[in-house]
Image: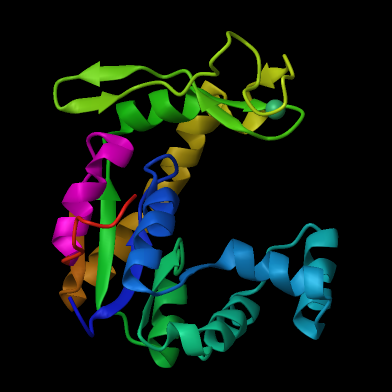
Amino acid sequence: MAGRLRMMFLGPPGVGKGTYATRIAPKLNIPTISTGDLVRAEIKQNTELGKKIKDYSSQGKLVPDEIILTMVRQRLQQTDAQKGYILDGFPRNVSQAIEFDKIATLDTVFNFELPDWVLVEKLSGRRVCDSCGTGYNIADIKNGEYVMPPLLPKVDSTCDKCGSDKIIQRADDTLEVVKHRLQVYTDETEPLIKYYADKGILKSFHVKKGLADLPRINAMLGIQEDSKL
Ligand SMILES: [Zn+2]
């Protein structure tokens, strides 16, 4: 895999690609780049771009692709990204992908796949501490090859981190909203998957056990198993 580390992680909400990226990138000595992080950094540093982004969001508008692409291009020029990087959740549609191809070349797009019924259970099983934001999951998936244990607080209904008893389900994670989010993702992403498959750089990875799949992903990337997770 050496020298071919310009990667993008693609996958539906709930598939765990962000978690995989944050575990894998340090082992390869490359950064994870997510547009959400870039946006937050620009706003926090109050840059010219940050101010523009704020204007768009205060008007309830989406940040235009050209701003996103400018941020990504600047990020790719930094020293730590010269060996490679993992793009997390970007490009998110074909028009962004076409624009991105003008500023950089991806070596591999990993498409993380998980059947919708597992995603629905996982996403609607999400719970979060209302006080400190610690995440939990009540979904207990044990079905054939899919095994994902729940992530529960050690003491029933009490946050491990802050002791609050307000562990709630976000409005975003209710069943109907989850189903809608997955449908939007599928509609938007199917053409993108085809775009990268046609380029011959798409690799599919079937998620089955969540974090326990990391050894299989590492093996695929040629990462040695000795280092701690
Ligand atoms: Zn808490």
Q: Residue at x 53, y 26 (%)?
A: 136
Residue under the image location 43 percent in, 69 percent down: 87
Q: Residue furthest top?
A: 156
- Quarter assignment of residue 143: top left
Q: Nearer the viewer, residue 21 or 206?
A: 21
Residue beneath the point at 71% across and 70% down: 41
Residue 188 seen in the current view? no
**What percent of the width, then of the height, locates residue 165?**
72, 14
Viewer-proximal residue among 228 and 208:
228
Residue 178 position, x and y percent, is 50, 31
Residue bounds of the magenta highlight: 205-221
- Give the number of marks: 0
Q: Quadrant of residue 36?
A: bottom right
Q: Tell me the quadrant of the picture where the N terminus can be found.
A: bottom left
Figure check: 188 above or below 210: below
Towards the viewer: 106 or 190? 106
From this viewpoint, is residue 57 visible?
A: yes
On whether residue 133 falls in the magenta region, the answer is no
By what rule are the colours in the image chosen?
A: rainbow
Q: Quadrant of ligand 1?
A: top right
Left or right of 32? Residue 15 is: left
Is 16 left, or right, of 171 in this rendering? left
Residue 73 locus on image (x, y percent):
53, 87
Q: Residue at x 60, y 85 (%)?
A: 70
Majority secondary structure in the magenta region: helix
| Image quadrant where residue 72 sits | bottom right
Task: Decide: is 103 above or below 5.
Answer: below
